[in-house]
Each structure stands twice: as structure tokens, then as C-alpha cells.
Image: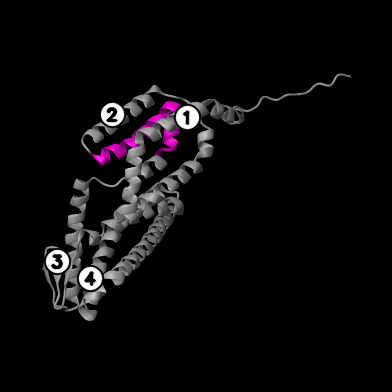
């Protein structure tokens, strides 16, 4: 008797996934060359960016952005493996345009353009090597990287000054409600025994940027619905602004009753951390309200359908 082996065709998806390791080996050298070229091209930009994270408290959260973005990308690995590789020359055009942006930024000493061009090169490289479907899968991790780039000075100042004035007005309002003698001149709050200046560092922009970042991460992990995630991120803006206004008011109250030392040094820094934690807890509460509201709306819809 002659034994025969019955063979079944391998499903396309399984065969495609098995072929990926070989594809990766074939593309290992080109990818290595691209990575080395990227590092050489952006070495100075990246070093200056990391230095800003280390020296500017407004953007110290930047150290967390890249690892979190890499995790978001790693989470999507199964979806990427299931996709066909569809390289597009448009990606090369995007890369060249982004390098042009880097050159323009370098000539004009505009760090923001140079740093934003990093995202263009990454996006274009993905399209050139893997195709548009892969870019769509990786769009969120790439978009998240925007949070690592400090705002241009002209935009930063346009945001910081109104926040300073709002915080000083909020402080004046609360102190007046508490019948504490106060006089405000711009961003300066004059009390009976001391004077408080709501400086740029006290404008709240630091906690605003950090809270937006945490809001994005918390929304991503806490709820799969885009609407809830979007509203959670949006809620961080008024929460951060109001919390900072209350912090200025609390500093004014402490300075009035305990003297100028209560508004300086350790107490000032500690109050900032406390207010930030309270603000983040408030974002938790916003998420709870949103989920409860959506559940009530769904029950109401089902009741109307039943009647």
C-alpha cells in the first residue's frame, strides 16, 4: 500500500502572517539604513528637544511621551501583521517635504518646525515602506507624539498671559468673598502684609499641558468610545484652569493668615502638586458623569423604543 498525505490549503491570513518574519528579514537592512539616516539627520534636534524636557518644567512630561507612544504602537502589532504591505511613493514625497520643513526651520532658527518635521518623516516613512493602511493603524501613536513638542514661544505667550490674568482674577474673587482685603493690578495681587505676583510659572500652563497628556492616556485606557475619550480630554482644560485659579486663591489665603513664607518655597511647590492631584481626580469624576449620562440616555432610548 502506498501512503498518501492529504494537504489542505493554508488560509491566506495565516500564510501572510507566517511570511512576515521573512519580510522583516528582507527589509531589515533598508530599515536599518533609514533609522541610521534619521538619527544622523535629527541628532541635533533630538538632543535639544531632550534638553528642553530636562530644563523646562512645562515640558518635563516629554520623557514619558515616546515610551507611551511605542506602547500604543506595540498594542497594534496584530492589526499591522494582518495588513498587506502596500508601499507608496507618496510616502517618499512626504519624507522629502518634511526634510524641506526641517531645512526651513533650521534656516529660520524655528525649533518648532524642525521638531514637527520629525512626525512628517515618520509618517512618510511608514507610507513609503508599509503603505497607507499601516499609517491609519499607527495614526494615534504618531499623533500622540505631538505632545512631546514644546509650543512655539509666540503661541505659548498668547496662552500663558490670559491664564495669568484669569488666575489672578480668580484669586481676587475668592479673597473678596472671604472678606480678605485685596487689590489686584494686572497679574499682581496686593494683600495687607504681602504682594503676590502670578508669574508665568504660576499661570497654570504647566499643569494644563500635563493634565491634557494624562487625560489622553486615561481616556484611552478607561473607555473604548471615541466620544467619551474626546470629552475627557476636553474636560482637562477647564479643570486645569479652574484648579490653578483656586490654587492662587489658596496661596493668597495662606499668605494673609500665615505670612509671606506660606507663598514661597516648599509650601508653594507642595500646593502645586496637591492641586494637580485634585484636578486629576476631578477628571476621574468627569469620566464617571459621562459614562452615567450615556447609560441613562441609552436606557431612555430603549424605553422609548419599547413603547
Query: Disc 3 versus disc 1: distance between alpha carbons?
Result: 55 Å
> Looking at the image, is mark 2 or mark 3 earlier in the sequence?
2
- Looking at the image, tell me whether mark 2 or mark 4 is earlier in sequence order: 2
Q: Does residue 160 lie above or below 122 as drawn?
A: below
Q: Is residue 63 visible?
A: yes
Picture coordinates of residue 8 (x, y %)? 70, 25
Q: Is residue 112 magenta?
A: yes
Mark 1 = which residue?
31
How many numbered marks does the figure carry?
Answer: 4
Q: Which residue in the structure is indicated by mark 2?
A: 100
User: What is the crowding at mark 3: few (fewer than 14 residues within 10 Å), some, or many (at least 20)?
Assistant: some
Which is more N-terminal, label 4 or label 3?
Answer: 3
Q: Which residue is pictured at 34% across the width and 56% down the height?
A: 211
Per the rendered image, the range of residues in magenta is 110-139
- Residue depth check, mark 1 versus mark 4: number of the one nearer the observer: 1
Residue annotated with mark 4? 249
Task: Measure the C-alpha gap from mark 3 to mark 4.
Answer: 12 Å
x and y percentages locating residue 15 in the rendered image: 61, 28
Q: Main secondary structure of the magenta part?
A: helix
User: CA gap, disc 2 to disc 3?
Assistant: 45 Å
State the residue position of label 3. 188
The label nearer to you, 3 versus 1, is 1
Seen from the viewer's position, the closer of residues 230 and 99 is 99
Amino acid at each position: 500500500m502506498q501512503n498518501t498525505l492529504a494537504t489542505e490549503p493554508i488560509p491566506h491570513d495565516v500564510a501572510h502572517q507566517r511570511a512576515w518574519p521573512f519580510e522583516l528579514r528582507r527589509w531589515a537592512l533598508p530599515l536599518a539604513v533609514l533609522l541610521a539616516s534619521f538619527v544622523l539627520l535629527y541628532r541635533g534636534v533630538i538632543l535639544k528637544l531632550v534638553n528642553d524636557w530636562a530644563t523646562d518644567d512645562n515640558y518635563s512630561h516629554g520623557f514619558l511621551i515616546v515610551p507611551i507612544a511605542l506602547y500604543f504602537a506595540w498594542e497594534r502589532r496584530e492589526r499591522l501583521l494582518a495588513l498587506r504591505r502596500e508601499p507608496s511613493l507618496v510616502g517618499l514625497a512626504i519624507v522629502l517635504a518634511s526634510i524641506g520643513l526641517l531645512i526651513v526651520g533650521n534656516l529660520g532658527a524655528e525649533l518648532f518646525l524642525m521638531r514637527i518635521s520629525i512626525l512628517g518623516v515618520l509618517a512618510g516613512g511608514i507610507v513609503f515602506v508599509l503603505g497607507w493602511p499601516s499609517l491609519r493603524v499607527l495614526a494615534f501613536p504618531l499623533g500622540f507624539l505631538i505632545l512631546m513638542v514644546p509650543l512655539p514661544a509666540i503661541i505659548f505667550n498668547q496662552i500663558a498671559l490670559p491664564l495669568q490674568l484669569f488666575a489672578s482674577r480668580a484669586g481676587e474673587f475668592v479673597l473678596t468673598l472671604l472678606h480678605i482685603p485685596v487689590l489686584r493690578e494686572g497679574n499682581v495681587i496686593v494683600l495687607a502684609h504681602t504682594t503676590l505676583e502670578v508669574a508665568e510659572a504660576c499661570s497654570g500652563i504647566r499643569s494644563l499641558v500635563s493634565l491634557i497628556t494624562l487625560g489622553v492616556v486615561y481616556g484611552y485606557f478607561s473607555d473604548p468610545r471615541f466620544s467619551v475619550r474626546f470629552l475627557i480630554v476636553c474636560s482637562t482644560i477647564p479643570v486645569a484652569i479652574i484648579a490653578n485659579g483656586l490654587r492662587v486663591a489658596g496661596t493668597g489665603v495662606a499668605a494673609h493668615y500665615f505670612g509671606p513664607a506660606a507663598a514661597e518655597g516648599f509650601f508653594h511647590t507642595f500646593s502645586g502638586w496637591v492641586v494637580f492631584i485634585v484636578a486629576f481626580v476631578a477628571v476621574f469624576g468627569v469620566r464617571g458623569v459621562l459614562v452615567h449620562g450615556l447609560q441613562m440616555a441609552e436606557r431612555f432610548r430603549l424605553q422609548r423604543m419599547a413603547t
